[in-house]
Image (cartoon, rainbow, N blue to C red):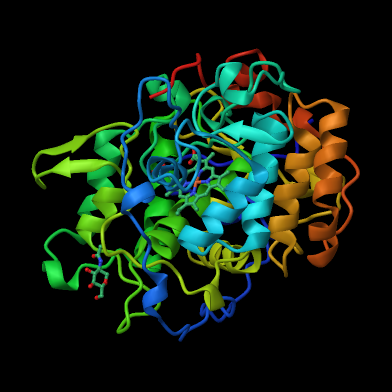
Amino acid sequence: MTNSFIVAGLFASFAAAYPSLAIEKRDTVNPFINPSPGWSPSQLIDVSGEHAFVAPGSTDLRGPCPGLNALANHGYLPHNGVATITQFVQATNAVYGMGIDLATFLAAFGAVYDGDGTSWSIGGPPTAAQIGGLSGLLGQSYGISGSHNKYESDASPTRGDLYQYGDDYKLVMSQWKEMYALQEGVADADVDYTIDIMMAYRAKRFDEQVASNPYFFSGPFTGVLVAPAAFTFINRFFSNKTQERPEGVLNREVLKSFFAISGSDSDPVYTPGWERIPENWYRRNHDDDYTIPGLNFDTLNIIAKYPQTASVGGNTGTVNTFTGVDPAMLTGGVFDSSTLLQGNNLFCFAYQNAVQAQPDAGLALVTKFASELASLSSELSCPTLSKIDSSQFSQFPGYTSLKAGTSGSSGAHY
Ligand code: HEM
Ligand SMILES: *[C@@H]1O[C@H](CO)[C@@H](O)[C@H](O)[C@H]1NC(C)=O
């Protein structure tokens, strides 16, 4: 007996998947983003001297995250692509204005699930020398490139799905072109890849995956939290903050630079791993760091406009068979369709699922992760989730083939 609801077809309404999901009418202005953060020349990011761009060498690790690849290329993270939680938190805060809460969460999660509990690789598995001879808690799982469905997700802005493209960390040119074209025809001076444009693109990619990827799987952590973040980060972090537009403006050249794209509009060239912080580029003002509540609110805004993107579930082996899993069934009723979208619950749901549901995380890891984040959880007043019923996912081949041992990486790095 299954309590999931079959959604047939790309344009099936979300109401069919979650009959009573309470989507509030809401004020869409994000109260966690400062509307006038101010601006100062000190927001300029140094890309000279020790922070000049140095392309990755053959043993340097680069992976699915353009933000982190760029940090390593500019010496804000170790150039080899392996760093500690502390280094990730400091670098993402200093260079991009990622909130300490969000950076700590993301970095700690990487260390526990894709690293040795302290450090991890931004690409594939490092050599023993690169991690100082330490042996990882998870054996060979050392990098976010090898973390499909643990960290790495389907329906990414430019990265391909593992089961469609055979790797999950390289840019897929057709997806890049689709994103780039979102400002097609707009005069250079007026181009801005705004947060609204990125939110709409999130929904478009979700719908495309339903219609094209038999293995599409949108998990409670990867699909609900990581996937939308990848879209909001593009605008929130990569945009250039200026005196006139302190909230930032994202033009074509800056977008290309952060995505390692060169060449002309009609003939773009992707050089894997060459993500670059542009010259004369200004980060977020630290009075306006992008925090967990900020990301949570942006994600709820996406859901309010595009409710299908909140769905946990997947295609069942052929396209257009997206089947949603009821959050109440998954969490023993702790989260349900009437409360999921209130307050910080969506974030709590995603993060507690990550803690509870990792297919291959041992108890020690779960305990370590939970204690590192206990203070965060109480700060957000998350309800306590004691178990999650991941048997709900057995109908999704995008989930079960991962459990059967297909990892996202064969040690490849670039
Ligand atoms: C410690 C902090 C971070 C971690 C652990 C992290 C991890 C990841 C992972 C695992 C992905 C792949 C997700 C997917 O498959 O879609 C990803 C994608 C992405 N990340 Fe990060 N990231 C971090 C910080 C940042 C920052 C600071 C930025 C921006 C400045 C950023 C921008 C992006 C973007 C734009 C993508 C989507 C790539 C694409 O598909 O086109 N990330 N990140
Ligand atoms: C960022 O904005 C400033 C101020 O308008 C401008 O001088 C600078 O060239 C811009 N940077 C990039 C990389 O476009």
Question: Would you place residue 393 above or below residue 191 in this image?
Answer: above
Q: Position of residue 29 (x, y in %)?
A: 51, 80
At 61% from the left and 16% from the top, the residue drawn is 128
Q: Is residue 364 left or right of residue 82?
A: right
Q: In this view, does 182 lie to the left or right of 342?
A: left
* Rendered-image quadrant of the N terminus: top right
Which of the pair 313/148 is nearer the observer?
148
> Would you identify the image quadrant in which residue 93 lies?
bottom right
Q: Where is residue 381 in the image (x, y as percent from the top left)?
A: 83, 65
Q: Where is residue 9 in the image (x, y as percent from the top left)?
A: 45, 40
Q: Quadrant of ligand 2?
A: bottom left
Which of the pair 59/271 is nearer the observer?
59
Which of the pair 32/12 is nearer the observer?
32
At 50% from the left and 14% from the top, the residue drawn is 410
Residue 5 visible:
no
At 52% from the left and 61% from the top, the residue drawn is 94
Furthest residue toward front: 49
Which of the pair 309/404 is nearer the observer?
404
Q: Where is residue 214 in the image (x, y as percent from the top left)?
A: 47, 26
Q: In this view, does 277 lie to the left or right of 75?
A: left
Residue 289 visible:
yes
> Would you identify the image quadrant in which residue 32 lies?
bottom right
At 24% from the left and 49% from the top, the residue drawn is 256
